[in-house]
Amino acid sequence: MLEVRNISVKIGDFNLKVEKYNTRGRRNFIIGENGAGKSTFLKAISGIIQIDSGEIILDGKRIDNLPIWERRVSYIPQNLLLFPQYSVKDNLLLSVRYGSGDLGIYNELVKAMALDGILERNIFSISGGEAQRVAVARAIISKPRILLMDEPFSMQDERSRMSIISNLLKLVERYDITYVYVTHNVRDLELGFDSLTTLEGGRVVETVSSLDELRTYSSLSLLDYRNIVKIDDQFFKIADEAIIEEPGGYPCSCSFSNGSYFCSVIIEGETYFFTSSSNHRAVIFRKDRCKKLE
Amino acid sequence: MLFQARLPTFLPHPTSNVKSPLRWIFLPFLLIYFLIIVIPIARVLSFQPVSYIERDISSGILQSIAITYEICAVVATSAVLFSLPYSFIMARGRTGLYKAADSFVEIPIMIPHTVVGVMMLITFEPGMPLGKLISTVFPGYSFDDTIFAVFITLFFLSSAYSIREIGTSYRGDIINYENVAKTLGIGEITSFAIISMRMLLRPILKGFLLTWARSVSEVGAILIVAYYIFPSFSKVTGVFIYSQWISEGLGPAAASSAILVLTGIVITAVFKIVESYHVRSAEY
C-alpha cells in the first residue's frame, strides 16, 4: 500500500500540498483539471521530483529518502518516452540487463501482449497503440511494487483505450502490482476502481471508493459537468423534479436530443447545463430537491 | 506515431506548401541571406588563380592550419567534456543560484576579443595572483606566447557553444528519458551512460563543431596573448593571415584565406555527414 503524508513540492508558483493520500486495493485513479498537480504528484511519488517535506511510504517502508531506482515505482508518462535509440526488444529488456527487470516476465509479456511481431522494429515504426503496449510492458517487466500512469492511453480512441485498460487489469493482478492511474475520462472508471481521488490546485479534495460517495463540486463537475449549478455561491446537483418553469426565472434554451432536452441556463452571468424531460425558456430550481455540493 | 516522431532536419516540414504566398514573400530574404554568405566565400576561393594558391602553400600556411586545427580540436574536446557535468548539474538545479550561475556562460561571447586577451594576461601572467599560484606549482611557468595561453583563451571564448548545445538538449528532453529509465530500476550512472549519452551524441557532435569553428575563427584575443607560439614560432591561422596581409599585402593573404576556407568547408562537410549518419542509424 502507498501512503503519502504531508508532502509539499514547490515548482515555480505552483505548490503541491498533499496532507494524506492512501491507495486502497489495486486499482487507484486520480482525476483533476489541467494544472491540478496530477503529474507533479506522480513524479513526486516516483522520485523524479524531489519533495520539500513529508513522507512517502510504500508497503510500510519510507521511500522518499531512496533514490528513484531503488523505490521500485515505475512511471509511464503521457508521451510514453520509449527510448528512441533502442529497438522495441531493447526497450523491453533494458531493465532486465541493467535494472530490476525479470526475463521470465519479459518472455510472458511478449506473448501475452502480442509483441513478438514487433520486437526488432525501432520505436518510430510502430503504431501509437503498439507503443502504449510496449510502454506498459516495459514498466511491468521492471517488477515495480507500484505502477504510476499519467494518462498514457489518452490519445487512443475509447474502445482501444478500454481494451488496453482491461488487459492491464489482468496483468497487474497476475504480477501483483498496485497502480495509480491519472485520467480525465469518466469512462476509464467503468471497469471498476478501488479508490478515486480528486486533486484541485495541488490539494486532495476527496477520495472515494464509489462514484455515489462523491460530494464535492470539483469531483462531480470533472466526471459530468451537466446538472450542476451554482446559486448564491453554493453548488447544487439538480434532478429533473427540481427544475420549475417560471417566467422571469433564469433564461434558458434547450435542444432535443436522445429522448431528452439538453438545456443551457445563465445564472449570475455563468452558463450551466442540465438535462430535462421538458423544454424550458426560463427556470428556477427548488433547492430542497437538489443535492448540496461541498 | 505522432507523439514521438522526429523529422530529420534536412527534410521540408510536412505542412510546407508551394502555393503559400508567404513563401514567395520570404524567398527574397532567403536568397539575400545566402548571397551575403556565399559571395564572400566564392570571392576568396576565386580571387587568386590556382597556381598562385599552390605557390602560397610553401608560405607556411599549412603548418599554421594544422596547429590551429589541432589546438582547436583540443579546445572543443575539453568544452564537450566540461559540458556534460555542467548540463547534468544545471538540469537539476531548482534555485535561483543555478540560474544566476548559468547566465555567466554567455558573457565571454559578448566581450570584445581584444578585451578577452587583456583579461587573460592580467589573470594568467606569472606576475598576476593566479599566475603566481600556478608558478608555485609549475616552476618556470610562463603564459604569453604559449600553447596554454592559446588554449585557455580559446576555451574562454568558445566553450559556451558546446555548453549551450549539449545543455539545452539534455535539459529540454533527454533528462525525462533518463528519469523514466531510473524508474525501471536502472541506476543513475548506467541511466546516464546508456540513455542520455546515446541521445546526446548528436548535440555533442554539434557542440564540438561549433566550438571548434568558433576557435578557428579567433584572432583578436590571440594577437594579444600569443602572436607567436613558442618554441616553434608558429602562428595560429588567423594571426598568420593577418601578419601576411600587413607584411606582404592582399594577394598572399587572400591565397592563404582560400586554403583555410577550403579546408574548413571540407571538415564541416565531414561533420555533417557523420551527424546525418548518426541521425539515421540511431533514430530511424
Image (cartoon, coloured by chain):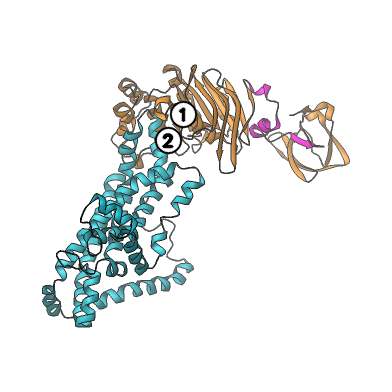
| Amino acid type assigned to the residue bearing label 2 in the image | Gly
First to last magenta residue range: A210-231
Relative image position of residue B136 (x, y in whole percent):
26, 51
Q: Is residue B6 above or below residue A61?
A: below
Q: Is residue A262 visible?
A: no
Residue A91 lies in quadrant: top left
Q: Is residue B198 above or below residue B233?
A: above
Relative image position of residue B124 (x, y in whole percent):
30, 59
**Any idea which chain is the cyan one in this picture?**
B
Relative image position of residue A281 (x, y in whole percent):
82, 42
> As rendered, which of B50 and B150 lies closer to the eye?
B150
- Residue annotated with mark 1: A164
- Residue annotated with mark 2: A129
Crowding at mark 2 (Cα within 10 Å: few <14, some 14-19, many 20+): some
Is A54 on the left-hand or right-hand side of B165? right
| Amino acid type assigned to the residue bearing label 1 in the image | Ile
Chain letter behind tag 2: A
> As rendered, which of A46 and A106 lies closer to the eye?
A46
Residue A149, numbered label? none
Is B211 on the left-hand or right-hand side of B50? right
> As rendered, which of B111 and A237 lies closer to the eye?
B111
State which quarter of the image contains the C terminus of chain B.
top left
Name the residue at 33% across, 62% down: B120
Q: Is residue A177 visible?
A: yes
Residue A4 lies in quadrant: top right
Crowding at mark 1 (Cα within 10 Å: few <14, some 14-19, many 20+): some
Relative image position of residue B45 (x, y in whole percent):
22, 75
